[in-house]
Amino acid sequence: GCMNYMLPASYAWGNFSVLALGIWAIVQRDSVDAIVMFLTGLLLTVLTDIIHISVFYPPNNYLTDAIGSIGMAIFSLLLKPVSCYLVYRMYRERGGEYSLNIGVAHAGRDRSTYEPIDQQDAPPQWPDSRQPSSHTETFSATEDRHFPHTI
Protein backbone atom coordinates (compact mmCIF):
# COMPACT_ATOMS: atom_id res chain seq x y z
CA GLY A 1 0.00 0.00 0.00
CA CYS A 2 0.83 3.65 -0.02
CA MET A 3 1.32 3.78 3.76
CA ASN A 4 4.37 1.97 5.01
CA TYR A 5 5.06 0.75 8.53
CA MET A 6 6.91 3.99 9.21
CA LEU A 7 4.00 6.21 10.31
CA PRO A 8 1.71 5.15 13.17
CA ALA A 9 -2.02 4.56 12.90
CA SER A 10 -2.73 7.95 14.48
CA TYR A 11 -1.36 9.63 11.35
CA ALA A 12 -3.85 7.78 9.16
CA TRP A 13 -6.77 8.29 11.59
CA GLY A 14 -6.11 12.02 11.81
CA ASN A 15 -5.85 12.57 8.08
CA PHE A 16 -8.78 10.33 7.18
CA SER A 17 -10.92 12.07 9.81
CA VAL A 18 -10.11 15.43 8.25
CA LEU A 19 -10.93 13.95 4.86
CA ALA A 20 -14.35 12.94 6.21
CA LEU A 21 -14.86 16.47 7.56
CA GLY A 22 -13.94 17.82 4.13
CA ILE A 23 -16.54 15.64 2.44
CA TRP A 24 -19.13 16.81 4.99
CA ALA A 25 -18.17 20.45 4.33
CA ILE A 26 -18.58 19.98 0.59
CA VAL A 27 -21.95 18.23 0.91
CA GLN A 28 -23.37 20.76 3.41
CA ARG A 29 -23.02 23.84 1.23
CA ASP A 30 -24.95 26.16 3.55
CA SER A 31 -23.21 25.09 6.77
CA VAL A 32 -20.56 27.41 8.15
CA ASP A 33 -19.93 25.01 11.04
CA ALA A 34 -18.83 22.22 8.72
CA ILE A 35 -16.30 24.49 7.02
CA VAL A 36 -14.99 25.74 10.39
CA MET A 37 -14.51 22.18 11.61
CA PHE A 38 -12.75 21.24 8.38
CA LEU A 39 -10.45 24.27 8.60
CA THR A 40 -9.70 23.54 12.25
CA GLY A 41 -8.96 19.92 11.41
CA LEU A 42 -6.61 20.93 8.60
CA LEU A 43 -4.72 23.32 10.85
CA LEU A 44 -4.48 20.68 13.56
CA THR A 45 -3.18 18.04 11.17
CA VAL A 46 -0.47 20.41 9.97
CA LEU A 47 0.88 20.38 13.51
CA THR A 48 0.41 16.65 14.06
CA ASP A 49 1.94 15.80 10.66
CA ILE A 50 5.05 17.77 11.55
CA ILE A 51 5.27 15.89 14.84
CA HIS A 52 4.66 12.49 13.20
CA ILE A 53 7.21 13.02 10.44
CA SER A 54 9.86 14.39 12.77
CA VAL A 55 9.43 11.68 15.43
CA PHE A 56 8.99 8.69 13.11
CA TYR A 57 11.44 9.63 10.35
CA PRO A 58 13.44 6.47 9.62
CA PRO A 59 17.19 6.24 10.13
CA ASN A 60 19.44 6.37 7.06
CA ASN A 61 19.83 2.61 6.68
CA TYR A 62 16.00 2.14 6.50
CA LEU A 63 15.28 5.20 4.38
CA THR A 64 15.14 3.28 1.09
CA ASP A 65 12.29 1.11 2.38
CA ALA A 66 10.07 4.07 3.30
CA ILE A 67 11.03 6.65 0.68
CA GLY A 68 7.63 6.50 -1.03
CA SER A 69 5.50 6.93 2.06
CA ILE A 70 7.72 9.60 3.62
CA GLY A 71 7.76 11.49 0.32
CA MET A 72 3.97 11.47 0.10
CA ALA A 73 3.63 12.50 3.75
CA ILE A 74 5.95 15.46 3.17
CA PHE A 75 4.15 16.35 -0.07
CA SER A 76 0.79 16.25 1.77
CA LEU A 77 2.22 18.46 4.48
CA LEU A 78 3.46 20.98 1.90
CA LEU A 79 0.02 21.15 0.25
CA LYS A 80 -1.90 21.70 3.49
CA PRO A 81 -1.25 25.48 3.77
CA VAL A 82 -2.65 25.90 0.25
CA SER A 83 -5.65 23.78 1.25
CA CYS A 84 -6.12 25.89 4.39
CA TYR A 85 -6.15 29.07 2.31
CA LEU A 86 -8.71 27.66 -0.13
CA VAL A 87 -10.93 26.39 2.68
CA TYR A 88 -10.70 29.79 4.38
CA ARG A 89 -11.88 31.42 1.13
CA MET A 90 -14.82 29.00 1.05
CA TYR A 91 -15.56 29.96 4.65
CA ARG A 92 -15.67 33.65 3.72
CA GLU A 93 -17.86 32.92 0.67
CA ARG A 94 -20.39 31.11 2.86
CA GLY A 95 -20.76 34.16 5.05
CA GLY A 96 -18.36 33.26 7.80
CA GLU A 97 -16.82 36.17 9.60
CA TYR A 98 -13.96 36.00 12.03
CA SER A 99 -13.37 38.99 14.24
CA LEU A 100 -10.95 39.06 17.13
CA ASN A 101 -11.31 41.68 19.83
CA ILE A 102 -8.27 41.48 22.08
CA GLY A 103 -9.50 44.13 24.52
CA VAL A 104 -12.41 42.00 25.69
CA ALA A 105 -10.78 38.65 24.91
CA HIS A 106 -13.70 37.69 22.67
CA ALA A 107 -13.30 35.78 19.44
CA GLY A 108 -16.24 35.05 17.22
CA ARG A 109 -18.85 36.65 15.04
CA ASP A 110 -19.91 40.26 15.34
CA ARG A 111 -23.28 40.11 17.06
CA SER A 112 -24.03 43.84 17.09
CA THR A 113 -26.72 43.48 14.42
CA TYR A 114 -28.71 40.90 16.37
CA GLU A 115 -31.97 41.98 17.93
CA PRO A 116 -32.70 40.97 21.52
CA ILE A 117 -35.24 38.22 21.88
CA ASP A 118 -36.75 39.47 25.12
CA GLN A 119 -39.61 41.93 24.67
CA GLN A 120 -39.57 45.13 26.71
CA ASP A 121 -43.36 45.60 26.28
CA ALA A 122 -44.27 42.22 27.73
CA PRO A 123 -45.80 42.19 31.24
CA PRO A 124 -43.42 41.05 33.98
CA GLN A 125 -43.66 37.47 35.10
CA TRP A 126 -43.40 38.33 38.80
CA PRO A 127 -45.01 41.29 40.60
CA ASP A 128 -42.78 44.26 41.24
CA SER A 129 -41.74 44.36 44.89
CA ARG A 130 -41.57 48.18 44.85
CA GLN A 131 -45.29 48.57 44.15
CA PRO A 132 -47.80 47.86 46.93
CA SER A 133 -49.92 44.81 46.39
CA SER A 134 -53.68 44.73 46.88
CA HIS A 135 -53.51 42.74 50.12
CA THR A 136 -51.22 44.99 52.18
CA GLU A 137 -51.94 45.67 55.80
CA THR A 138 -53.27 49.04 56.81
CA PHE A 139 -51.86 51.18 59.56
CA SER A 140 -53.28 54.19 61.21
CA ALA A 141 -51.24 57.35 61.18
CA THR A 142 -50.83 57.32 64.97
CA GLU A 143 -49.77 53.68 65.27
CA ASP A 144 -46.22 52.49 65.06
CA ARG A 145 -45.39 51.28 61.51
CA HIS A 146 -43.56 48.21 62.85
CA PHE A 147 -46.63 46.67 64.45
CA PRO A 148 -49.61 45.90 62.22
CA HIS A 149 -53.08 46.88 63.28
CA THR A 150 -55.01 43.86 64.48
CA ILE A 151 -58.73 43.52 64.99
Image: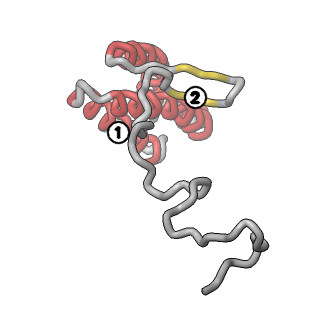
16 left or right of 29?
right
Instruction: Residue type at mark 2: give it.
Output: Ala
Identified at 58% across, 28% down, the residue is: 107
Crowd tier of the residue under label 1, counting other residues whose Cα lies within 10 Å: few below 14, some 14–19, many 20 or above = few
Nearer-N-terminus badge (2/1):
1
For the point 48% across and 25% down, which residue is it? 111
Rendering coords of residue 41 (x, y %): 44, 34
Say which element carries label 1. helix
Query: In what element is the residue under mark 2?
Result: strand
What quarter of the picture does the C terminus occupy? bottom right
Q: Measured along the vertical axis of the image, is residue 138 above or below residue 8?
A: below
Residue 100 visible in the current orientation: yes
Instruction: Give the label on residue 107, or none.
Output: 2
Q: Quadrant of residue 12?
A: top left
Please name whichever residue, 135 or 28, is drawn nearer the observer in this view of the structure: 135
Residue for badge 1:
16
Number of numbered discs visible in the structure rendering: 2
Viewer-nearest residue: 140 or 92: 140
Q: Is residue 137 left or right of residue 18?
A: right
Q: Position of residue 112 (x, y in %)?
A: 50, 22
Residue 129 location (% of width, % of height)? 59, 58
Q: Residue at x 51, y 69 (%)?
A: 135
At a point 26% along the width and 34% down the height, the residue shown is: 24
